[in-house]
Image: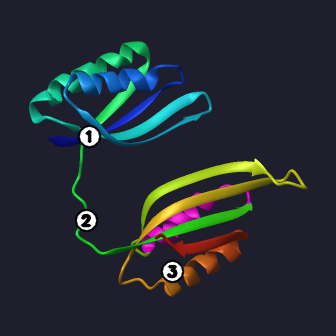
Amino acid sequence: MDHLVLTVIAEDQPGLVERVAKCVAEHGGNWLESRMSRMAGQFAGILRVAVPAQAHSGLIEALQQLEQQGIRVLVAHSGTEPERRWQMIQLQLVGNDRAGIVRDITQLLARHGVNLESLDTDVMPAPMTNELLFRADARLAVPSELSLDQLQQHLETLADDLMVELVLQPVD
């Protein structure tokens, strides 16, 4: 079995995931993992499936037919995992919302070879002031040669500039 990574986007509607799952199952595939969410009336997801090599073209064609129902699917062959040792770290950040927070944080992480494994963000009103707060929760793969103290120091310097609070903690 080969692994494919599918990206799905469509206007949110009941039965959308079922139609994708049906295509996968009809071609002998196995749904392995996924992350999906509804946002601003749109549905988006990414999933990894295992599919017999001889079923690839049939599955891809069936997924492309979903476009007629307003469901766009992008298919990619799974990549190879990097041969590197990582420390898994959880990053939580909260601060007043402003443009550029994600850009600045990810720029610093990339500069230090940190891989962003997952990122969840939202903006919500602060409890007492109703001022908008930006919140981010990220899972980071930190190269083993980068000490957590160094990463913490770099992030705290940036956090002071951005006026945000952040917490780093190892993932068990």
Which image quadrant for residue 84? bottom left
- Distance (Cα) linking label 1 and label 3: 33 Å
Q: Quadrant of the N terminus?
A: top left
Judge left or right: residue 32 versus residue 50.
Answer: right
Q: Label 3 amino acid?
A: Leu
Query: Are the residues at dot 2 and dot 3 in contact (C-beta closer than 8 Å)?
Result: no
Which image quadrant for residue 6? top left
Q: Label 1's element?
A: strand
Query: Are the residues at dot 1 and dot 3 in contact (C-beta closer than 8 Å)?
Result: no
Which image quadrant for residue 74? top left
x, y percent for residue 129? 90, 55
Q: Label 1 amino acid?
A: Ala
- Distance (Cα) linking label 1 and label 2: 17 Å
Residue identified by numbered label 3:
151
Q: Is residue 133 above or below residue 66?
A: below
Q: Is residue 110 above or below residue 79?
A: below
Image: magenta residue range: 96-111
Q: Residues within 10 Å of mark 3 (few under 14, many from 20)?
A: some
Residue 76 badge: 1
Q: Label 2 amino acid?
A: Pro
**Main SS of the magenta segment?**
helix
Q: Earlier in the sequence, mark 2 or mark 3?
A: 2
Q: Looking at the image, which is closer to me, 15 or 75?
A: 15
Residue 30 is covered by the magenta coloring: no
Q: Label 3's element?
A: helix
Residue identified by numbered label 2:
82
Q: Earlier in the sequence, mark 1 or mark 3?
A: 1
Residue 108 badge: none
Q: Label 2's element?
A: loop
